[in-house]
Amino acid sequence: MIEVQNVTKRYGQHVAVDNVSFTVNDGEILGFLGPNGAGKSTTMNIITGYISATEGTVKIDGIDILDQPEEAKKRIGYLPEFPPLYMDMTVSEYLDFVCDIRKVPSAERKQSLERIMDTVKIDDVKGRLIKNLSKGYKQRVGVAQAMIGNPQVLVLDEPTVGLDPRQIIEMRDLIKKLGKSHTIILSSHILPEVSAVCDRIIIINKGKIVAAGTPANLSKHLGGGRLSLRVAAPEKQVMAALEQVPGIARVEPRGTFEPGTIDIVVDPDEEVDIRRPVFNALSHADCPILMMRPLDLSLEEIFMQVTTQESEVS
Ligand SMILES: Nc1ncnc2c1ncn2[C@@H]1O[C@H](COP(=O)(O)OP(=O)(O)OP(=O)(O)O)[C@@H](O)[C@H]1O
């Protein structure tokens, strides 16, 4: 549905987006995650045709955003980081105005607006001036304007920024609901946000994609072969048994969570599979393993890892 190919954006000498390629499948919610200044908004602006790329192409449903901007833009609804709301209009007036711009036929308007206002739950404020709405309601009006014209793709740039915790949960629920009938790209610098709503995540840092995958895959790949174990033996005995095992870089005791056992985390030297040597060593030393599993990283750990050191996962 969305194909981004080798997109680069330069501002003078500064490379804001550096040879970025990815696709978003129909019906998918893709999270575009990165620290401030990573290039998220620039990428969103290129995808939606607001600015042009220095190099590369973006296709929406096979239509090039630069060659056929009108056709491509019809298929996209955009909630920019700062939604273009007119504060002195009422919600109804504003949405009607957006219908004018998007050339929604008058016969379809009433029904379409009712459906949108019902979906984003702004019926109760439709007669109010936008400037008098809470930040949460303003953001929902922003989502409503993105939905006008019935686009299949929604691009949401930092949709929960500035919202309070309850409004954040409501916005996440709304995005999940919209995800059932739209393809969505969601940019955020907030980890729980993307893990709560996205099927797949792309992490961008300094303009480059540094990791991509489902939350589960990312943790597996970037876990680097670390193991978490529970062993039924005294700590000293376990540490001594593992001391001489080749391929182990570090053994870290994590404490006792079950009487008579010790939990440890074992780091391999590189990405080597140390499960067998660990098993053999502990078995040899009469230290029964009650549990051994790969230590998956939390999304937060992944984010820290890929945005502080450059690594590539796909
Ligand atoms: N018009 C511009 N002229 C020059 N540099 C720009 C321009 N727009 C963005 N940049 C630079 O490009 C880089 C990426 O900016 P961008 O706004 O895309 O990041 P971001 O990931 O969306 O961050 P944030 O969450 O802070 O908005 C930044 O270093 C920014 O300063």
Image: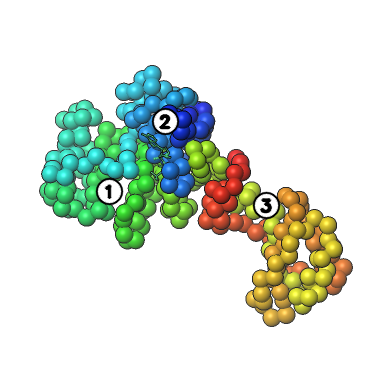
Give the residue displayed 42% in from the left and 35% down from the top.
43
Left or right of 129 in this view: 280: right
Label 2 packing within 10 angstroms: few (<14), some (14-19), many (20+): few
Give the label on residue 224, or none. 3
Per the model, the C-alpha gap separating discs 3 and 2 is 36 Å
Q: In the shown orientation, is residue 68 left or right of residue 127?
A: right
Which residue occupies 15% across, 53% down? 132
SS state under label 2: strand
Tag 2: residue type?
Tyr
Q: Look at the image and tell me in which quarter the N terminus lies.
A: top left
Mark 3, Cα crowd under 10 Å, few <14 / some 14-19 / many 20+, is some
Badge 1 or badge 3: first in the primary sequence: 1
Nearer to me, 237 or 13: 13
Which residue appears at 76% of the width and 68% of the height? 289
Q: Which mark is residue 11?
A: 2
Residue at far front of view: 13
Q: In this view, which residue lies farthest toward the bottom?
A: 259
Check whether the beta carbons of the residues at disc 3 and disc 2 lie within 8 A of each other.
no
Total number of numbered discs in the rendering: 3
Q: Amino acid at mark 1?
A: Gln
For the point 34% across and 51% down, the residue is 161
Does the closest atom of ligand 1 sit within 8 Å of the Cβ of label 2? Answer: yes
Q: Quadrant of residue 87?
A: top left
Residue 257 visible within the image: yes
- Residue 150 picture location, percent across and down: 30, 34
Write down the residue under mark 1: 139
Determine whether the beta carbon of the residue marked 1 sits less than 8 angstroms from the nearest atom of ligand 1: no
Of the two numbered discs 2 and 1 on the same chain, state the one appearing first in sequence. 2
Q: Earlier in the sequence, mark 3 or mark 2?
A: 2
Q: CA distance from mark 1 to mark 3?
A: 40 Å
Relative to 142, is 252 above or below? below
